[in-house]
Image (tube, coloured by chain):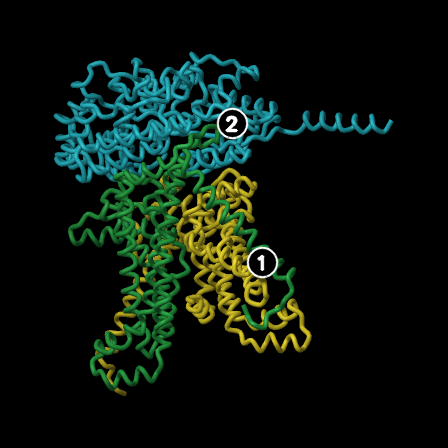
């Protein structure tokens, strides 16, 4: 009978398509320049490694633009399968419960083993929910670390400072005498606020840094951090510290040019720095801490971004995404990514593999990020979860800039940040209603 | 309508339809949506939302920062308008006077009209590069360490400079054509009456150019409010920080960077009111102008 | 020969200074396309002319930076052309049709239509950008040429321009046409359109430049690399300059030049039409 024939043809067609055609998935990311090339390389390697899934990475601009593009696409029902969301956007994407498939569920549903203990401790919970379930797969995980110009420190006869007290008393004066600008940094909110809190184990927000609810208030207006910024302004006056603006690169360039001796940047900057012909030796070590605040410095948490599996996709597509995540977390992939970019490997196994290959004997500085993320944890080192955090960061950047250009005082700046951030948090709570 | 028009009904309806459909869908609908969402706080993914009445407006108007940005926008628009009009006027008067090379000058002075604002911003970024920008070095000669992205005034200066550079040509074209339309007889009479060149300019030429100037004033204010977005965005490299910004850039920062749909929509509505006020002002002026001519 | 007067010399000096003010930035961009990037990051723009232009040009026009391999300078140039042309043509066609209907027909709702269209002049796209974006998104027109072009047409500048012009066309023409038995369509195509040729050309130039130079709107609604226009690409260029190991100043400057040259050529070559169009629209 024709009817049966027809339907059986369709059925068999469908079967053959399912069996032979590759499932195509898309990844939207914010990795420009050399980092983007490495992402492309991973995608090519993944596509070559199997013939069921075809992954296309698409560069969507800055972190903020990528998030906005992803949200818009989601509302239009045209979301990519995987979206890279950065630390400051975590509350937005995790707050929208139906927007993503928690990576932990995705992997479990598709028969991929998942144990959160396999991940190195500093990366486990930043992109997790309040129960510790991992929602986003940490991807380009980095932590702020201290890079230094080895030649400069030798010329000045000092060693890299472990504490800010040491920097202030010994390191900075010697470096300044040797003709260097002792210190610069590339991201004030990330390095001198978020990770300052973690390193000194200070609470950053109420509700367990915001993980436990929406009625959160920021705790940024405290004496320790104000003392730190007061010190910064003093260092700036005595020529120990220079600020080149909010842009990341503007602060990194003087270090690369050999003018600045110590630069606080991302562990993910390692790859780029080591590829450049700098004309001096550089190395890295832990972020200094204030002995006056704590004698037991803690780990920092990851910055950078995670990959989120967007909801509303077919089972086959979700399986494909899971397959890519499996590939991505494989030790070999992680070690490749780690070596190319300087971002930390996210699993213990990958870390061990890199160590076994002798990578850290060659490049001790490459290990600093991981080691710093694996220092002792405290109750305030998991991360933070605050809504409209992109704007909160903008407020911090604005006020910090004003402190450093002398337009406002440390005291006024922090009360402004507290006031505006709390207003933003209250507004965000209402968007979730 | 022409008195001697056609009386068909279906044809004009068909002719008007594309225009009406497009403005209904892409003008009236978005405008209504903007007003509507300005009363809500919404989850960007579209899952939750709360009706908050006028709260978005109250938050904005009570925000010190928003008022600062509004004030900067006013100062910025004033500076850009003044300098691009003044420079263009001087150049137009001179270009109208010279006999030799008039056409070459005209071309050289107007081509920048076609340059896109972000390209102007991009060029400013290069010129003011902190390490080797030619203009940074130029200011260095006078002992000023020019730092775009750090110093508020320096950054504002580079934005104003790029915006003026981009806007001089339009004003130049209008002033020049205004000057050239002044009748020969008027000029000759002025030449006899008034011996000094500057006297002739202020007594005869300037008043005759005033209508063009009024019209350009509005054009320039609109330009500095809206079209300079590309310049601001490229100069701050997408990082607002403590850099100056205009109201339109703030709409973008809150709406597209920060995903605060309600707050950003409320800002849009405030801008709409502002533009409406400007337009009414413009009509008053044009009415007056019609009376004069 | 008479000695030139001092005032003439001053006039020329002012004009030369003005021309340099307008020209120097472009010359700097041009210079930077000819020297190696490694030299630029050390010294910045200088007075030497290098030999890297061909290399940089090839890189900028034919090599892509993304994975898709689609955002080459050539593809951005194509998109800019489509945006500029599509916008200009769309705006002129729709504007002429609407203006014709308003000026030449006795319509009961003509006044209403007139005011509906007129209001669009009051609010620029920038103030309703977010909801416009949402509308385009609902219509599934993100990353399409329609989505790029049509919302930009939703302002009635061209309609007004042609309305002004049609009103200045002598009444006798339409009467004569009616006596000859010409219908409205014939009158429009055979008489009014040819009569408007100069106006159309002038409008076309202004609208082409306007469309080509759009930035905010393309930045929002095109997120696919193969849809980028040159001007939208500037944003990417600045970001890539920030993140790259050796910032590719040469390549970026070539792209900036390519973004500038076509509209500049149009303006320079069709100067008289363009000036006429611009100054006539002031009514």
Q: Residue at x 50, y 73 (%)?
A: C168
Foreground disc of the pair 2, 1:
1
| Residue C25: percent from left, percent from top | 33, 57
Instruction: Tell me if mark 1 has few (under 14), some (14-19) or many (20+) residues whose alpha carbon lies within 10 angstroms of its own.
Output: many
Residue A111 against residue A196 in the figure, above or below: above
Q: Tell me what hue chain A is rendered in.
A: cyan
Asked whether residue C72 is in view, the answer is no
Disc ID at residue A310: 2
Q: What chain does mark 2 sit on?
A: A
Q: Nearer the viewer, residue A80 or A426?
A: A426
- State left or right for residue B86 relative to residue B253: left
Q: Nearer the viewer, residue A131 or C154?
A: C154
Quadrant the C terminus of chain A occupies: top left
Residue ID for mark 1: B16
**In which image quadrant can residue B96 be found?**
bottom left
**In which image quadrant can residue B222 be found?**
bottom left
| Residue A240: percent from left, percent from top | 16, 33
Residue C245 against residue A101 in the figure, above or below: below
User: For the view shown, which residue lies furthest in the right direction?
Assistant: A1
Letter of the chain shown green in the rendering: B
Separation of marks 2 and 1 at Cα, in angstroms:
43 Å
Q: What chain does mark 1 sit on?
A: B
Q: Residue at x 38, y 57 (%)?
A: B279
């Amino acid at each position: 009978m024709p009817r049966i024939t027809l339907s059986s043809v369709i059925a068999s067609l469908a079967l053959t398509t399912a069996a032979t055609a590759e499932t195509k998935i898309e990844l939207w990311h914010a990795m420009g320049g050399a980092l983007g090339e490495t992402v492309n390389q991973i995608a090519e390697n993944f596509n070559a490694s199997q013939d069921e899934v075809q992954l296309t990475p698409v560069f969507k601009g800055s972190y903020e633009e990528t998030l906005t593009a992803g949200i818009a696409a989601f509302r239009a029902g045209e979301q990519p399968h995987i979206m890279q969301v950065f630390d400051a956007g975590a509350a937005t994407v995790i707050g929208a419960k139906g927007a993503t498939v928690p990576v932990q569920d995705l992997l479990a549903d598709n028969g991929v083993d998942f144990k959160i203990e396999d991940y190195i401790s500093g990366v486990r919970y930043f992109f997790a929910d309040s129960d510790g379930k991992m929602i986003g797969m940490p991807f380009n995980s980095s932590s702020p670390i201290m890079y230094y110009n080895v030649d400069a420190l030798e010329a000045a006869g000092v060693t890299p400072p472990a504490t800010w007290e040491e920097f202030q008393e010994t390191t900075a004066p010697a470096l300044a005498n040797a003709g260097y600008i002792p210190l610069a940094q590339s991201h004030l909110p990330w390095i001198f606020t978020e990770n300052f809190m973690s390193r000194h184990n200070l609470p950053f927000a109420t509700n367990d840094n915001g993980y436990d609810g929406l009625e959160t208030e920021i705790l940024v207006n405290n004496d320790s951090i104000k003392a730190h910024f007061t010190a910064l302004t003093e260092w700036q006056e005595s020529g120990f510290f220079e600020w080149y603006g909010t842009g990341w690169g503007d602060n990194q360039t003087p270090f690369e040019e050999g003018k600045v001796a110590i630069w606080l940047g991302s562990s993910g900057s390692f790859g780029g720095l080591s590829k450049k012909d700098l004309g001096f030796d550089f190395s890295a070590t832990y972020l200094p801490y204030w002995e006056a605040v704590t004698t037991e410095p803690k780990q920092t948490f990851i910055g950078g971004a995670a990959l989120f599996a967007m909801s509303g996709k077919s089972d086959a597509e979700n399986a494909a995404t899971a397959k890519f995540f499996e590939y991505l977390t494989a030790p070999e992939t992680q070690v490749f990514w780690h070596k190319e970019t300087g971002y930390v490997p996210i699993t213990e196994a990958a870390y061990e593999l890199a160590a076994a290959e002798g990578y850290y004997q060659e490049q001790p500085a490459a290990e600093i990020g991981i080691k710093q993320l694996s220092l002792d944890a405290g109750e305030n080192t998991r991360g933070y979860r605050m809504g409209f955090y992109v704007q909160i960061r903008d407020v911090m950047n604005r006020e910090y800039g004003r402190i450093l250009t002398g337009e406002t005082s440390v005291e006024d700046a922090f009360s402004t940040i507290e006031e505006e951030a709390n207003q933003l948090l209250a507004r965000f709570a209402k968007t979730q209603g | 309508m022409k008195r001697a028009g056609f009386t068909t009904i279906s044809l004009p309806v068909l002719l008007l339809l594309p225009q009406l459909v497009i403005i209904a869908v892409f003008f009236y609908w978005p405008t209504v949506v903007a007003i509507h969402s300005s009363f809500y706080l919404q989850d960007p993914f579209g899952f939750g939302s709360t009706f908050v009445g006028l709260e978005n407006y109250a938050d904005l108007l009570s925000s010190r920062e928003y008022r600062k940005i509004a004030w900067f926008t006013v100062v910025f628009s004033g500076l850009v308008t003044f300098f691009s009009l003044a420079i263009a006027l001087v150049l137009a008067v001179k270009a109208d006077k010279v006999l030799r090379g008039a056409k070459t000058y005209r071309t050289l002075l107007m081509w920048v009209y076609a340059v896109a604002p972000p390209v102007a911003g991009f060029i400013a970024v290069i010129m003011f590069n902190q390490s080797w920008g030619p203009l940074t070095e130029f200011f260095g000669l006078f002992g000023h360490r020019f730092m775009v992205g750090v110093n508020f005034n320096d950054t504002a200066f580079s934005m104003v400079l790029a915006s003026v550079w981009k806007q001089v040509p339009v004003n130049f074209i209008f002033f020049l054509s205004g000057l050239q339309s002044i009748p020969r007889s008027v000029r000759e009479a002025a030449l006899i009456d008034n011996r000094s060149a500057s006297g002739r300019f202020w007594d005869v030429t300037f008043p005759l150019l005033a209508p063009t100037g009024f019209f350009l004033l509005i054009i320039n204010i609109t330009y500095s409010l809206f079209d300079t977005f590309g310049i601001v965005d490229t100069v701050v490299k997408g990082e607002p920080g403590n850099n100056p910004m205009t109201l339109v850039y703030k709409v973008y920062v809150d709406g597209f960077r920060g995903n605060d749909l309600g707050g950003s929509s409320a800002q849009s509505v405030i801008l709409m009111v502002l533009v409406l006020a400007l337009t009414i002002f413009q009509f008053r002026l044009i009415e007056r102008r019609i009376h004069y001519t | 020969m008479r000695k030139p007067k001092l005032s003439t010399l001053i006039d020329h000096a002012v004009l030369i200074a003005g021309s340099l003010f307008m020209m120097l930035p472009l010359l700097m961009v041009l210079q930077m396309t000819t020297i190696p990037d490694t030299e630029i990051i050390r010294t910045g723009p200088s007075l030497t002319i290098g030999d890297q232009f061909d290399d940089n040009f090839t890189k900028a026009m034919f090599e892509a930076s993304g994975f898709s391999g689609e955002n080459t300078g050539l593809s951005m140039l194509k998109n800019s052309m489509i945006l500029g042309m599509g916008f200009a043509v769309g705006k002129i066609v729709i504007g002429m049709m609407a203006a014709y209907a308003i000026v030449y027909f006795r319509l009961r709702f003509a006044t209403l239509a007139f005011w509906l269209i007129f209001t669009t002049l009051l609010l620029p796209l920038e103030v309703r950008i977010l909801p416009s974006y949402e509308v385009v998104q609902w219509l599934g027109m993100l990353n399409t040429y329609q989505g790029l072009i049509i919302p930009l047409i939703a302002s009635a500048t061209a309609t007004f321009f042609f309305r002004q012009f049609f009103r200045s066309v002598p009444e006798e023409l339409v009467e004569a046409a009616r006596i000859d038995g010409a219908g409205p369509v014939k009158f429009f195509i055979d008489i009014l359109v040819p009569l408007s040729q100069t106006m159309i050309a002038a409008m076309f130039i202004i609208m082409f430049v306007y469309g080509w130079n759009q930035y905010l709107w393309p930045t929002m609604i095109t997120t696919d690399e193969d849809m980028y226009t040159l001007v939208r690409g500037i944003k990417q260029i600045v970001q890539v300059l920030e993140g790259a190991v050796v910032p590719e100043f040469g390549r970026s400057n070539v792209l900036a030049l390519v973004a500038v040259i076509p509209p500049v050529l149009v303006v320079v070559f069709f100067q008289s039409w363009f000036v006429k169009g611009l100054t006539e629209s002031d009514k």
